[in-house]
Amino acid sequence: MSEENKVNNDQEAKNSTPIIEVIDAKKVYKVGNERVQALDGVSFTINKGEFCSLLGTSGSGKSTLLNIMAGIETITSGQVFIKGKEVTAMGENKLAKFRQRYLGFIFQAYNLINSMTAIENVELPLIFKEVPTSKRKKMAKEMLIKVGLEKRLTHKPTQMSGGQQQRVGIARAFVQKPEVVFADEPTGNLDSKTSKEVMGIMKQMARDNEQTIVMVTHDKEMARYADKIIEIHDGKVIDIRKGEGIVG
Ligand code: ADP
Ligand code: MG
């Protein structure tokens, strides 16, 4: 066993507290007279500090599952618990507060605001949390330095490469130290070298503060970075296995 794997195993033994529990999740979309069974009884747990990949081909139900876990989409039946709280039973207001307090998001298309600088984009979640301006600027700047963008602080998204924009996306997701970060195909628009860099940064960030990452991907190469791989096919879990937990 390599030193790296040994470290991962030791960490796993320490951190076997479940932070996310999905119990028999089902989702049916109705479009006209058609019913689409996007999730067909999905159950698993993710432990605190774990980096978990949800792997599957296009249309397998990954985004639906992630969005239900994050409280963005409603569930048809079943339950999702995060930190022991049933997300699938929360009303809009409670859910909004819960998301603000505990969850971060990274998107394939970065979803940055084009009229704002890198710093301003990273500040956004802190504005919602009513962090005072000077503290906010300082925190945003520190995060951007951590992701290697010290020379791009006042650049706007259109003045940056895809990889740089996703680094801003990562800085924004992690700036308020959320316990869980959800990422939907975060490297989907990036070349393979940049994808590896972005994965490395995400892992480093999460490791610094024992944060949990749930990442959706169709790409086996990216899934390997995770500690745990949950493979989905046609709305069902077909395999749960250890990832390689590649570091950076
Ligand atoms: P993935 O992210 O793995 O590509 P999705 O979760 O986006 O898969 O989709 C799973 C299935 O649910 C697909 O068959 C898709 O067409 C369907 N689906 C997703 N979102 C909707 C929606 N809003 N309305 C109807 N069907 C949907
Ligand atoms: Mg998807």
Image (tube, helix red, strand yellow):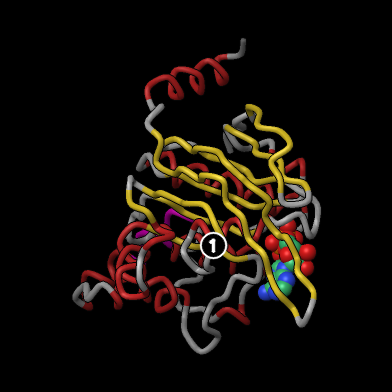
Magenta stretch: helix, strand or loop mostly: helix
Q: Residue at x 51, y 66 (%)?
A: 168
Q: Where is mark 1, residue-wise?
A: 75
**Which of the two residues, 116 or 98, is positioned nearer the viewer here?**
98
- Vertical order, 76 against 93 (above or below): above
Residue 144 appears at what percent x and percent y? 43, 62
Q: Residues in magenta?
A: 140-147
Kind of residue sitting beneath label 1: Ile
Residue 31 appears at what percent x and percent y? 74, 78
- The answer to whether the residue bearing label 1 lies less than 8 angstroms from the nearest atom of ligand 1 is no
**Which of the two residues, 111 or 166, is positioned nearer the viewer here?**
111
Residue 165 appears at what percent x and percent y? 59, 69
**Which of the two residues, 42 or 52, is positioned nearer the viewer here?**
42
| Residue at the far bottom in the pictured view | 115
- Vertical order, 150 against 203 (above or below): below
- Vertical order, 85 against 132 (above or below): above
Q: Residue at x 71, y 60 (%)?
A: 38
